[in-house]
Image (cartoon, rainbow, N blue to C red):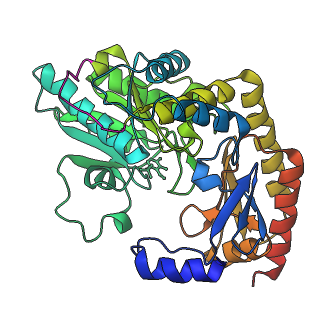
Amino acid sequence: MSNQSIVNQGQQYVMNTYSRFPIALVRGSGSYVWDADGKQYLDFLGGIAVCILGHCDPGMQTALNEQASRLWHVSNLYWIQPQVELAEKLTRLSGLDRAFFCNSGAEANEAALKLARKYHYRRGQSQRHQFIVFNHSFHGRTLATVTATGQKKYQEGFAPLPAGFVYADFNDLESVRRLINDETAAILLEPVQGEGGINPGQPEFLTAIRSVCDQEDILLIFDEVQCGMGRTGAFLACQSYGVTPDIVTIAKGLGGGFPMGAMLASDRAASGFAPGDHASTFGGNPLATAVANYVVDVVSSPSFLENVESMGAYLRQGLNKIEDKRIMEVRGKGLMLGVEFDREIRDLVEICMKLGLLLIGAGPQVLRFVPPLNITAAEIDQALAILQAALKEWQ
Ligand SMILES: Cc1ncc(COP(=O)(O)O)c(C=O)c1O
């Protein structure tokens, strides 16, 4: 089937929830994908920060195939070795104590919000039900996580939204302090805001938030769905800040393309949940955890993380060198970079695609770079050359 015939069929039968580009992708290898008409693209969005080992990584294939011939799915009423192993690795690597597995970022955040409320409830503090969240954040599309998301455009038309969310300004400690009271259960934030425009948290802000939470008996939840899993050059972004939250959520890169999410928590926070409090039929299933075990082994190795840091610096340097008056700022951390323009970038993204480079925005004016984490310098050079050519064409 051609691009056009797949697009036509999709437009007829698939629900209209995405502004999709008019191509159908059929194959991937490393940092490249191919469309149904055989055109090759350099993939610098990697399923939006998901394909951290690129496409069809041989080790991931082996992990999946070996598990697929052994056991696909059993209920979480039974133990399975790959899930237990993954929980041990993730807790060891994060410095936290316990893992809960699910299938997506929104589901991991939903679990974190529920855990925070139940934690206070079990301690006889059920009045502590309120979450402090941040403007320009993004936490998912379920009713609770879309309410936690501090961007009105995602909430419009879904009222009444769940109660108990108040909004502070990111990197503004005073705006957080003003919202704290006896009802505060948790503070939820992305250490590096993704969808909101690639906004890194300031180290002093995150450190101060940790102290405030300790003083006020408030749980600190970091949403690392986009910025975790090696993306910033540390296994978790919080580690590069030297701040340990009580709860961390991860997803996206965890399965490297296999749908997968997790919530990690300290023993203290995790004590909020008892059997029956939360569950997910598919969460941490044998296939997902077999793949994630492989991904985590690769991504947590020091040499892999060093490459993320050096390739991130290399890409950033290349972006900084581009001379274009429409560029306002290059910012981000590791291989999570954003270039802010003085205008909307949808047309620029389309020109890049035409020239063979897949990119995506983070908000209307920020071009986002979240390539595979094993990207090479030669691939970065290629992306920068295509971007320069696209900027020339972009009126
Ligand atoms: C920081 C963050 N949290 C949560 C989500 C939601 O993840 P999912 O789409 O897997 O539900 C996203 C998705 O972009 C995200 O970037």
Q: Residue at x 50, y 80 (%)?
A: 9
Q: Looking at the image, can residue 323 be seen?
A: no
- Residue nearest the viewer, comparing 12 with 266: 12
* Quadrant for the C terminus in the image: bottom right
Locate residue 168 relative to residue 58 in the image: left or right.
left
* Farthest front residue in view: 69
**Quadrant (top left/top right/bottom left/bottom right) for the N terminus:** bottom right
- Residue at 70 percent across and 46 percent down: it is 54
Judging depth in this view, the residue of 271 and 36 nearest the camera is 36
User: Which segment did they paint magenta?
Assistant: 271-282
Q: Using the image as rendered, state which of residue 300 and residue 224 is in the foreground.
A: 300
Residue 172: quarter of image: top left
* Percent position of residue 256, x then y: 59, 41
Eyeballing the image, is 379 above or below 107? below
Q: Is residue 341 left or right of residue 236?
A: right
Place residue 111 in its image quadrant: top left
Q: Position of residue 268 (x, y in %)?
A: 30, 15
Does residue 151 appear in the picture of this structure?
yes
Say which residue appears at 45% left-offset and 24% top-offset. 83
Task: Give the vertical position of 182 relative to 349 (above or below).
Answer: above
Q: Is residue 168 magenta?
A: no
x and y percentages locating residue 162 in the rendered image: 19, 52
In the image, 317: left or right of 304?
right
Chief SS of the magenta region: loop
